[in-house]
Amino acid sequence: MTAVGIVANPASGRDIRRLVSGASVFPTAEKASMVRRMLTALGSVGVETVLVSVDLGGISAAVLRGVRNRAAKETPWPHVRFVDDDAVTDSAQDTANAVRRMVAAGAKVIICLGGDGTARVATAALLAGPGCDVPLLSLSTGTNNAFPQMREATVAGLAAGLVATGAVDHGIATTRAHALEVRTGQRTALGLVDVAVSTEPYVGSRALWHPDALTELYCTFAEPDATGLSSIAGLLCPSPRDEPGGVAVRLCPAEQAPTVINAPIAPGLVLPVGVVAWRPLRTGELVEIGTTRGVVSFDGERELELVGTTGATVRLAEDGPLCVDVTAVMSQAARAGLFRSDRPVV
Amino acid sequence: MTDPVSTEDTITKVTMPKWGLSMKSGKITSWFVAEGDEVAEGDELADIDTDKITGVLESPVPGVVRRVLAETNEDAPVGATIALIAPADVPEELIDEAARAAREELDSGAVDEVAGPALGTVRVDGRTLSYATLGTAAETVLLIHGYGGDKNSWLFVQEPLSARATVHAIDLPGHGDSTKDVGDGSLDTLAGAVAGFLDQQGIERVHVVGHSLGGAVATAAAAREPGRIASLTLVAPAGYGDQINADYLRGFARASSRRELKPHLTQLFADPGHVTRQLADDLMKYKRLDGVQQALDSLLGTLLNGDRPGIDAAGLLREFTGPVRVVWGRADQVLPAANAAALEGRAQIAYVDNAGHMVHMEQPSAVVDAVAGTLDG
Amino acid sequence: MARTISYREAVNEALRQEMERDGSVIIMGEDNAGGAGSPGEDDAWGGVLGVTKGLQQRFPGRVLDTPISESAFVGAAVGAATRGLRPVAELMFIDFMGVCFDQIFNQAAKFRYMFGGKAVTPVVVRTMYGAGLNAAAQHSQCLYPLFTHIPGLKVVLPSSPYEAKGLLIQAIRDNDPVIFCEHKALYDMTGEVPEDSYTIPFGEADVVRDGDDVTIVALGRMVSVAEEAAAELARQDVQAEIIDPRTTSPLDRDTILESVENTGRLVVVDEATPRCGMAADISALVAQEAFGALRAPIEMVTAPHTPVPFAQPLEQLYIPDTQKVANAVKKTLDWKK
Amino acid sequence: MTPTQPAKATSGLDQKALLEAYRTMRTIREFEERLHLEFATGEIPGFVHLYAGEEASATAVCAHLDERDSIASTHRGHGHCIAKGVDVKEMMAEIYGRVTGSCRGKGGSMHIADLSKGMLGANGIVGGGPPLICGTALAAKHQGTGGVGVAFFGDGASNQGTTLEALNLASVWNLPAIFVAENNGYAEATAATWSVACDNIADRAVGFGMPGVIVDGFDFFAVYEAAGEAIERAREGGGPTLIEVKFTRYYGHFEGDQQTYRADEVARARASLDCLKQFRERVTASGRLDTAALDGVDGEVAGLIEAAVAEAKQAPVPTAHDLTTDVYVTY
């Protein structure tokens, strides 16, 4: 049985950035539609079973309606199994639970629909258990995404299916991403693109959009055409995604800074960010976080309150998630003629 | 009381008079004369109900009532011919012809609008003062109404006097169409308004007629500028004597509905039948205007000192040496006629039978006669 | 001074003068300015029947067009009234009360009592009522009895231009919620109206005509119908006293009772339907309080218990007319035990 | 390049503000828990709908408000009243139907109000409040006070036409209005996941051209920050916002509700999500407040509620005279 797991986060795309920066809303109907398009694609390349997460936000319900109402003349979908072993908590826990169950059920690829936050949770769930070598295909349905890709779900589904069925070899199809690992006391947390430290006292409504409070920024990669905090580094000292090593930046309020970068730190927010210094961050390098009381944010979301009692460190780890490279998969498929059939000329 | 319109054949058309600005028509409630009766000038011809009040129409000429054209209870527009008076020797055919024409006019309703008083306003001390003027003769008469009244209260007086004088009737501050703000409400303020009016009109010499509070205002105006005032005619004036019906004044000021107001109004007349629903309605409409309640309250403070008169006009009159006439209804329940004693020896006093406080409405000829007497010198 | 203007102009003038006098007065309603957001003039309409015409230019920002959302803007008027404004909301047709009644009867009407006398809600809802324009069942009703039924509301039915101006100014200055009902067939009625501002107190009936033979209590537009009937009856030596209550809540009971005490006969004329209406209410009042004075059974002249019909002959039959009033009066006069 | 100015940081809560917030949340909790007990004795007449579990919402939103601002509430309104500063003893007396109550015993639990404090009343009509708030916001805008109106309403009211009309009007008139949808999961016994046809109430904001955001209703700081942004935006003329606050109510729809429609979510929420518990842990862990200070507040609040109940029980009931007064200002 060839199985693929699809985890869709119902909550992504509705955080406070709709209010503070006019970010777009990603409707549930479109998330459900993406899952349905992927089912078509997965079915077309021979995936037999698709495991779909359940949620109270309406995505799984819409997929179920699609399964029931699928017309006979349409491309048949794989068997759809809803992963409902755990009670829905309406929190990030649901994503972690679903990933774990899907890996246990033999999923060969996990597709994750959400933003940076969702991808981070899925990655953590994969890396923490037997799923560390299960490839992840992260599609963007969030607000402020540096890690997940904006791609048509059909193509993503085709690529995931080809990886799951083994039609395209893992070695060609996947790359291991880096991650930023933050440790404080007993806690460990992962950032896929950036880890930022600010003097803001509370996690609050999570999304981060006050650059003046930022003190430190660490990036696994830094692209000049990104949005989010990594764009600060991207516009200052670009560091490509596919190269080892990242960037470390020290920040301060813009009016006190020797260097100011106007960066698109969130959709709709281009703000001056004060920079004190920057340097390359070597793979494996352990850095002591200098701010003892504040908040650590991962990929633009405030997660961790530092209360001054224990220190914190950040390390650029090599062993991030194994990611499906859609372009590489589809290129190989083309080369191998996987989507081609030739009729003999009579 | 109305302008006779005589034909060459000396047929006099008795027309529906215009008593006041808003009068459009009148109803003859009863004829006192019949066809063939001989009448003298000034004889009473009919009771006419104007909706505001019932007035008496007097004969403009001596002669014989040859035709009564408007029936009892018939509404006739102002200016319409309602009776014909002519000497006994005018031939019937001529009378018939005139009657036919008049009747046609009456039935068609196509009566030429009779020109009423000309309305105007002046600005004095930041207030707008409204007035109505009738007549163009050389002598000038100024009519000043009383507490809660207005220029229209002179409706039976202004018209007859207009034949002999330019007659102005003004609205005091707080009344009629004038600004409702009365400032401190003092007699001085009101007299200042009158003086301002005379200034604005360029009137150098004037016969002043004042009723009730207006009588006190007239006196105060005379005391300020004795040289300007040719004569005073005081109709039941305030500020003379020590009797005043404080309950009436307060009741009038406080009444907030027609039902409350009506019993107070009956004290204004010898014959309470004068208090029509329309009269009470109009007063209520006035009382409901913004600023009127404050004006009335303020002026009440001027008129009353506790339950006693708050004005001493008699003292002010010492400043004025010109002729003074007084008209007082014997049945006055607001400022009793006994108050006139304060003017004995100083003024020529006419006590009027069958008249209450509103002498100029109830027995207007008494007031007209007094003013005419003054004009005659 | 008084001059002759229309009922429509009287309403407009009352709004204008109060807006001039008091900056807290604002007006709102569908097309009250008319044309908001449209390519043409911002104040193209001034209300669907032009009642608020010209106010937009004179008071920019204080004449608010609204979406067709009666609940929202009537509720907004109520809310604004609790915070220092004196809003006048126009519920275009009284028939539309169904889509906003909660904000009127559960919110505005209840605040004072429900909050222990600590709320003041000076809101006015102006609304058009009545048949006569062939507007049929959903644009012609006389639903003021429904408002009258609700404690906490005051309900006003001006019958002439003079009443319209004075009662509207009173409504705006009044500290309670007021439902101000304008009969659409009266907008072109003319009458003498003072230029100055004035108020007519609520709960004070107008005795429109004096008479000793019969009391006719008539509401809103029916006042002029009753006057025509009374003029006709006068030619037959029947003198009818006509009472216009002006407000159905508060109701001037004394004037009605005093009149019936004098005449001994009562005819109530109301364009509304008969069940649970003002005619029944006033009849009950007189039956209870002046039974001894009655010399004949009370007559009610109302619309039939049907929706308002569309076709002209039907609508004419529907609305009480002079003849029906005169007949009812004669019935009370002819009654023998 | 003119950078967009970010809203100012809203988490600048000092010790005093933190303690006040805690006091408000604790007062609401204590008030409601006590009512839960007292209602069972049969001494409290009528319907009582408890706000326990939802304290962070009212507290965090109202922490940004002052006397310029007004709020409209729901049948579950005790928390909003307390957070907007209505006198707790008068509230308790009102719930007991006493003449000393906020509404002199004429309103009861569902109609507690204090207009002098900008509290437009708990409201017995689901969806009754949002239109009113358009009005208070309009008044603030017209008067130029910088004030805002906040409508609290539930998931049930989010389906009412009045609410949807009000959202539209607020946007059309660009009013300083904030619509706080308190989604506690149930409209009476009907699940919001069933009765709300879209997935989140906040999603509806798109249809009215305003921002719609979702916040964790158990997290005081999350609500505080989102509300702060929305309120500041409204004060500056930026227009309305819809904030969906998600959480669970701890008790039934009304007191006496056996809650047979619910699973074990309350126990889980109380154990791991509770707003007071979270708040205490976080402010003590970070050393911003110490346990002693918080315990001190707990003690004071307990005393206040105890006194409120005792006084309410002793207070006189209204008399026949009160039946017909307070209907009109003048009549």
Image: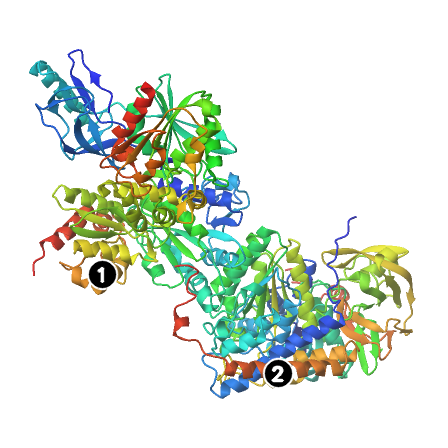
- Residue furthest toward the front? B345
Q: Position of residue D161 (x, y in %)?
A: 47, 62
- Residue that appears at 24% across and 20% down: B3
Report the chain holding disc 1.
C
Nearer the viewer's eye, disc 2 or disc 1?
A: 1
Q: Residue furthest bottom?
A: D41
Task: Residue under label 1, please give it.
Answer: C286
Q: CA distance from mark 2 to mark 1?
A: 70 Å
Left/right placement of residue C8 relative to residue D186 reads left
- Residue kind at label 1, given as amino acid type: Val
Give residue A87's mark: 2
In the image, taking residue A239 as reference, residue D4 lies left or right, namely left
Q: Residues within 10 Å of mark 2 (few under 14, many from 20)?
A: few
**Does residue B302 show up?**
yes
Residue D191 in percent (x, y) is at 52, 76
Task: Identify the amino acid type marked 2.
Answer: Ala
Kindly state the secondary structure of the residue where label 2 is placed: loop
Q: Quadrant of the C terminus of chain D?
A: bottom left
